[in-house]
Image: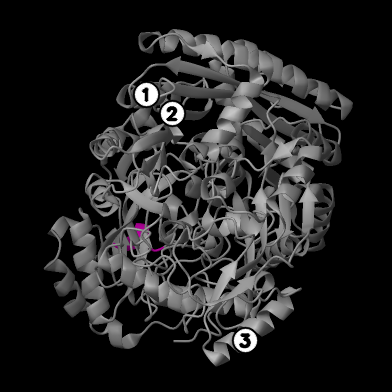
Amino acid sequence: MSAIAFPAPDNTIIVRRDEIIAGLARLVEPECLVTGDDEMRPFETDALTAYRRMPLAVVLPRSTQEVSAVLRYCHDAGVNVIPRGAGTSLAGGAIPQEDAVVIGISKLNKVLDFNIANRTITVEAGITNLAVSAAVAPEGFFYAPDPSSQLACTIGGNIGMNSGGAHCLKYGVTSNNVLGVKVVLIDGTIIDLGGDAMDVPGLNLLGLMIGSEGQLGIVTEAILRIIPTAEGARPVLFGFDSSEDAGACVAAIIAAGIVPVAMEFMDKPAIEICEAFAKAGYPLDVEAMLIIEVEGSEAEIDASLARIVAIARQHGVRVVKESKSAIETAQIWKGRKSAFGATGRVADYICMDGTIPTGQLPYVLKRMSEIVAGYGLRVANVFHAGDGNLHPLILFNANDPTEQAKAESAGNDILKLCVEVGGCLTGEHGVGIEKRDLMGVQFNAADLNQQLRVRAAFDADWRLNPAKVFPLEGRTS
Amino acid sequence: MNAPAAPQSEDELAALIDKAVSDRAPLSIVGGRTRGSIGGRGNGAPLSTRALTGITLYEPAEMVISARAGTPLAEIESALATKGQMLPFEPMDHRALLGTTGTPTIGAIAAGNISGPRRVSIGAARDHLIGVRLVNGYGDIIKSGGRVMKNVTGLDLVKLSAGAFGTLGVLTEVTFKVLPRPETAMTLSLDGLSAQNAVSAMAEALATPFEISAAAHVSANASAPSLTFLRLEGFSESCTYRAERLSKHLDNFGTLRLLEIDEGTALWQRIRDAEDFAGSDFATVLRVHVAPSKAGAIVDIAHANKASIMLDWGGGLIWLGLAQGADASETIQRISEAGGHPMIVKSAVVTLPVLTPASPAIAALARKVKHAFDPHGIFNPGLLAGHI
C-alpha cells in the first residue's frame, strides 16, 4: 500500500551484485561492508517507516579517503548511491533501493579540532548532533541547531536537511552555523568548501551544499560555529483558551522587540499526549499552550519574562507556569522533544513539516482541522510558533490500509495549503521521497529546471540519492 | 558613456536579457554604482536595476521584508525603523571609502553579501537572505526560497546567489529576515592594546555569555593610540549588567572605558564603512577574511609591509591599507599563504586579480554551476575571476 512510487530497480545492476560486492570489498575492511539480509535490515528504511527497500549493499567507510574510493568505484561501475547519516529522516531521505549501495557515515564520528579562539569545532560528519554540544560544553559552549532527534541524528544528516530545532528562532538553522565542509563528489574528488574563516569569498557552494539532501555529494567533515552557553535559561508555559489567542500573543511579543530563544506551540491533543508521557506539568484544561524560553542572568530572565507575561495577559493567557528548577526545565523540554515518540505510543502518525507566514496561523490551524476531519482522522499540532514551522501529526491506524492512504492525502492537502498561504512544503525535514511529487506545487517548471541544471553540475548521471527531491517525471537525463 | 539600460519591470528585464543572450552580448549589472569594481571589473554593456524599486512586502510581526532589487537601502532602513526594526547584519556603505556617489541598493547588498560589524554575532547578509527572484541566462524568471525563515524545499539557490556578484543572474527581488532594533547600545573600549593582544581580548569577550554584538580594533597611528571596542546591545538594564561582568572578565587586559552613546554610534559607522581607509593615502585597500587564530600572522605581514590595519569581527575581518609604492601583489600572496582570504576593495593597479584563485577542483565545479545559470557567459564577465 504505497502511494509514493519508486523507480523500477535496474536489473542489469542487480545481476552484477556479487561482482559489485567484490569490488567494494577491495576498498574497505570486511567489518565496513554489510551484505547479509539480516544485517542490512536496519538500513532498509529511515523514520518514514511505511516505505522500505533492501539495498544492494551497505558500506560504512572509516575515512574521507574510503568514501572517495567507494564513490569513485560506484561512479565507474554505474551504481547508484544512497548517502545515510543516522537514518532519522522523517521524509524518507535515506530510504535505499534494490539497485543502490548505501554509504553510511556512522563510523566517521570523531572530533578533529576544537578552537576556542575561533569559536569553532571541526568534526567528522557522522558524529551525533548532541555529541557536538557535549564535546564543547565543558568550555561553556553549545552547538545551536537542536532537532528533536539530536541524540541520534548526525551532523552530516543535519547538513543534508539543513536541520533546525526549537531554538533556531534566535540562533538560526544549520546553514547559519556551518563555516566549512569537506565534500566528496560522485567521481571521488575531495573538495573543501568555505573554511575556518567567516564568509570566504567566491561562489557560495557551501550554502548550496547545505540542505541539498545528499544530491550533490557526501559531506565527511564540517567546521561548525559554536556559541557561548547563556548564564541561565528558563522556559515558561502559557495556557490559552484558543489557538488564535496563542498565535496573537506570539506576534505581539515579536512586535514588542523581544525575540525569545524559543517559542513552541502545542494544541490540546498534543498537550495531552505529551503530558501523559513526560509528566512535565503541562496544563490540561487549555486549548493551546506556548513554551517560551528566555536566556540570561537571573535578573535578565526576570526582566524579559515580566515583559512577556504582560503581553500574554493582554492576550487572555489563563495559565502562566514558570520552571522553578533545572529538573522542571528538563521535563518541560522532554515533553516537547518527545512529542513524536509519545504520539507514536498512542497511534500511528505521519508528521508534516510545512512552514507558513505566522500571520496565517489562526486560518491555517482552522483549515488543517477541517482537512483532517474531512478524512475522518485526528490531528495533534506541535510547532515552532516563532518561525511558523508547523508539525501537524496526523493520527491513523497503520493496520488499516485505507487509513494510511487517507493520512497521506490529508498531509498533501495540508502542504498545499502551506504553499497557498505563502509558505513552503518543508521547513526542516527535507523533501526526500515524501514531498517529491509536490514540488510542482511550490515551483514552476523554470524554477525546477534551474535546480535540475545545478544538480546536474554535480551529478550528471543521477547516481546520488536518485529517487529523491525532484519529481520523477520531467527529469532530463 | 551611454546611460545604462534600466528596465522598468521584471518582464522587461527578462526580454532585454533574452535579446542579450541571442546577441551573445555580455552585460555588466549595476545597482546604485557605489561599490566601484569590487568583485572584479566587468566589461559588458551596463544594465541597471535602478528602475526596479519598491517594498513589496513588509510584515513586522513576521520579521520579514521583500523589495525589488533597485530599492535604495535607505528606503528599506527607514521603513524598518518606523516599526523599531533593522537589517540585522548592518550592511556597509562603500561611498566614503571609494569616493563614489549614488545610492546603495538592496539587491546589491544581497549580490555582494555585504555585512558589517554585527556579522560576528548575528550572521552575514546571506544568513538573513531568505528569498530571491532572478532572471537567469536563459531569460527565465526564477524564484528560490520565499518569505518564511525555515525552508528547505529544493536546492538553496538563495544562499548561492548571495555573494555571487550577479554572475548567475540579475536579482529582481530579495526577501530578508529582519530583527527588532535593540533598545540601547553600549560601547566599551580597551585602550593601548597591541593588535595581537586585541585579538586575544576580543576572543575572550566573544567566548563569554554576555552577547557581544561587535568587536573591533583600530590600530595606532600618528595622532591616536590603538583602541579595542566591544559593543553590547539590548535592554538597558541588561547592557549595564553585562558591561559590569565583562569588565571583571577582561581585567587582565586593562580597564574598560564606556563611550558616550553618540560617540559609539559614530564609531561603529566609521568601522562598518572602513572610513579610515578613505582618501589618497592608500593606493590599495584589502579586506581579508581569516580565522581569528590566524589574525596575528596577517597583522605581522601587514606590519612588515608598513600597511595600516583595522580589525573587525573579533579579528575575523582585517582591513589593510597599503601606501603608494608598497608591493601589493607580494602582500596578497603572503596573506594567502598565511591562511587569509584577501579581496581587493580598492587598487591603483588594475591588473591585480581581485580574489586569490580558487583551487582547480572547486573552480571547475563553480564554472559548471555558473554554466547551469548562464550558459553563454552573459552576466558580469570578469567578476569572480579565478573562481568561476
Separation (CA) of disc 3 from disc 1: 53 Å
Point out residue A128 in the picture as x, y percentages from the top left corner.
Answer: 37, 42
| Circle on res. B218 | 2
Amino acid at pointer 2: Val
Question: Quick one: label 1, few (<14), some, or many (20+) residues within 10 Å?
Answer: many
Check contact, mark 2 vs mark 1: CB within 8 A: no
Q: Residue at left 41%, top 27%?
A: A141
Check contact, mark 3 vs mark 2: CB within 8 A: no
Residue located beneath label 1 in the image: B198
Question: Which comes before the other along the chain, label 3 or label 1?
Answer: 3
Side (left or right) of B276 relative to A349: left
Badge 2: chain ID: B
Is residue A397 visible in the rendered image? The answer is no
> Do the residues marked 3 and 1 share a common chain?
yes
Camera-side residue: A309 or A338? Answer: A309
Question: Quick one: label 2, few (<14), some, or many (20+) residues within 10 Å?
Answer: many
Residue located beneath label 3 in the image: B18
State which quarter of the image contains the C terminus of chain A: bottom left
Q: Dot 3 lies on which element?
A: helix
Which residues lie in the magenta part? A40-44
Q: Dot 2 lies on which element?
A: strand
Q: Residue at left 72%, top 33%?
A: A290
* Number of the front mark, 2 or 1: 2
